[in-house]
């Protein structure tokens, strides 16, 4: 398989160089060399792919991703995080993963600070530990200030409603 | 074993044989020996072998002083800054705090801000505090100190206990009896050795009450390292680490970091002692 790929790539390179030579001979009268003309078709795709590969190698070798322009400081990480981009949690749909099951209670982690506990709907036996579900969030943390208290009382849980079970092909949406 | 060490000419090739012989002797002693007990026994062996009532005793204390003072010359002797990065903390959700209404007023300096009523902990400060805490714990482990992991969160009890077991230290994740530290000589007998540092992975008993270990450790002059969330009181904790203590990802990160720091420090101590044995016997031969 590897040998076949090498043969194919060499063939492709051969084709590309052949086309370049043909272009050169076609526009030999003009001042501009063929390299400055807008590439199209295979040549453009080849340039793009080699550029991407160079970029990937550079970031892999360099370690930090400063070349791509993305900063690693806390402020920009927070601003770009899905939790902040999501906005208010009420009514938002997220994907969660069940990490614990106690008879009819399903403990679902959707990427927030807390997990949520939802009741297993009747007849739904396919929900087990590790299965992914769609949730509609109501609250990220259930807290309330009671009379005479200094601070809020927190239940250390989030609140969400179960929508449907997720198809296993779709990737998990991380919210943090 | 002492006679073997004094008569065997210690060359470089015989050194590995010495290592394997001492290791096999220790495993013969007890297969359940923890790493801490093994390190202490190795210390004891060094003292037993080289003790003699002449000027050699001066050399002994000189060597132990060298072992103890060398880590203090560099700020990050165990290279613990390479264990964790800010991105690791972020992906483990360490920056997520409780809601605004649960905030403790003394945690305000450690907070980055409040986003839609949820407090966000400043991870730059958390990084600094975490480096200090890990460095301190590693130095205590290097010097053979007892480290006690405490957490009353039932969700992470097993995790904390297995962490302590993996690094050869101790954990207390059950009900804290009142006089555990303050009344130890009566409750547990005289001469009980108290922990040298208490690592609190969650400073709260329940959401209303702080863990008694913080107050009792302060009374007994035991330094504490504690992960403080936005609803915790960081006053009496010696090395507070502002961070999330409710998410399993964050707790697993802390446990892994402390375990790696302690194991590194103990490994370093073993290396230093073996080097000292080697250098002292070579100087004695010459």
Image (cartoon, coloured by chain):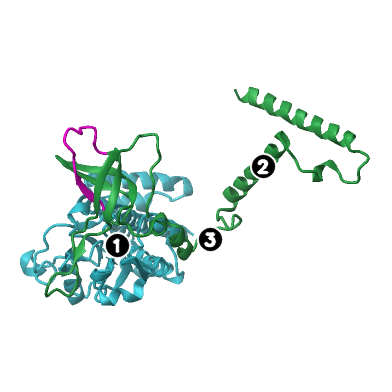
Closest to the observer: A6 or B275? Answer: A6
Residue B98 in view in this figure: yes
Question: Which percent across, then down, holds residue A119?
Answer: 17, 44
Q: Nearer the viewer, mark 2 or mark 1?
A: 2
Position of residue B201 in the picture relative to residue B71 (left or right): left
Marks 2/1: CA distance? 58 Å
Dominant secondary structure, magenta? loop
Which residue, as the protein is rendered here, is positioned at the far left?
B186
Is residue A123 part of the magenta span, yes or no? yes
State which chain disc 1 sits on. B
Q: Nearer the viewer, mark 1 or mark 3?
A: 3
Chain represented in green: A
- Residue identified by numbered label 2: A48
Q: Is residue B79 visible?
A: no
Chain where mark 2 sits: A
What is the magenta range?
A115-129
Compute the Cα span from label 2 to label 3: 24 Å
The residue at which mark 1 appears reads as B144
């Amino acid at each position: 398989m590897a040998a076949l790929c090498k043969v194919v790539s060499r063939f492709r390179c051969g084709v590309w160089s052949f086309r370049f030579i043909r272009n050169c001979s076609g526009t030999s009268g003009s001042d501009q060399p063929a390299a400055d003309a807008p590439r199209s078709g295979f040549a453009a795709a080849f340039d793009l792919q080699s550029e991407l590969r160079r970029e990937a190698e550079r970031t892999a070798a360099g370690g930090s991703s400063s070349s791509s322009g993305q900063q690693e400081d806390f402020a920009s990480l927070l601003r770009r995080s899905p939790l902040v981009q999501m906005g208010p949690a009420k009514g938002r749909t997220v994907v969660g993963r069940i990490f614990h099951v106690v008879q009819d209670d399903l403990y679902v982690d959707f990427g927030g600070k807390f997990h949520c506990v939802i009741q297993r709907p009747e007849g739904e036996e396919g929900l087990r530990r590790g299965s992914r579900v769609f949730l509609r969030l109501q609250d990220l943390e259930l807290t309330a200030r009671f009379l005479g208290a200094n601070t809020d009382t927190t239940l250390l849980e989030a609140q969400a409603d179960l929508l449907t079970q997720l198809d296993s092909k779709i990737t998990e949406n991380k919210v943090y | 074993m002492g006679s073997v060490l004094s008569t065997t000419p210690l060359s470089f090739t015989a050194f590995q044989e010495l290592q394997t012989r001492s290791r096999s002797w220790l495993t013969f002693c007890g297969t359940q020996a923890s790493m801490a007990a093994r390190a202490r026994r190795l210390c004891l062996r060094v003292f037993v072998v080289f003790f003699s009532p002449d000027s050699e005793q001066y050399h002994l204390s000189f060597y132990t002083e060298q072992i103890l003072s060398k880590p203090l010359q560099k700020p990050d002797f165990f290279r613990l800054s390479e264990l964790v990065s800010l991105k690791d903390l972020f992906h483990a959700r360490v920056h997520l705090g409780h809601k605004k209404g649960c905030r403790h007023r003394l945690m305000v300096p450690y907070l980055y801000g409040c986003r839609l009523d949820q407090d966000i902990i400043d991870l730059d400060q958390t990084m600094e505090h975490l480096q200090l805490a890990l460095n301190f714990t590693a130095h205590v482990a290097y010097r053979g100190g007892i480290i006690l992991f405490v957490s009353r969160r039932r969700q992470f009890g097993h995790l904390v206990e297995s962490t302590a077991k993996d690094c050869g230290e101790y954990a207390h994740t059950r009900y804290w009896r009142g006089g555990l530290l303050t009344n130890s000589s009566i409750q547990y007998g005289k001469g009980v050795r108290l922990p040298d540092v208490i690592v609190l992975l969650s400073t709260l008993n329940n959401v209303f009450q702080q863990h008694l270990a913080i107050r009792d450790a302060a009374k007994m002059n035991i330094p504490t390292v504690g992960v403080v969330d936005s609803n915790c009181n960081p006053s009496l904790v010696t090395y507070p680490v502002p961070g999330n203590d409710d998410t399993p990802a964050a707790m697993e990160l802390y446990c892994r970091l402390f375990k790696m720091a302690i194991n590194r420090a103990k490994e370093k101590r073993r290396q230093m002692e073996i080097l000292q044995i080697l250098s002292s016997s070579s100087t004695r031969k010459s």
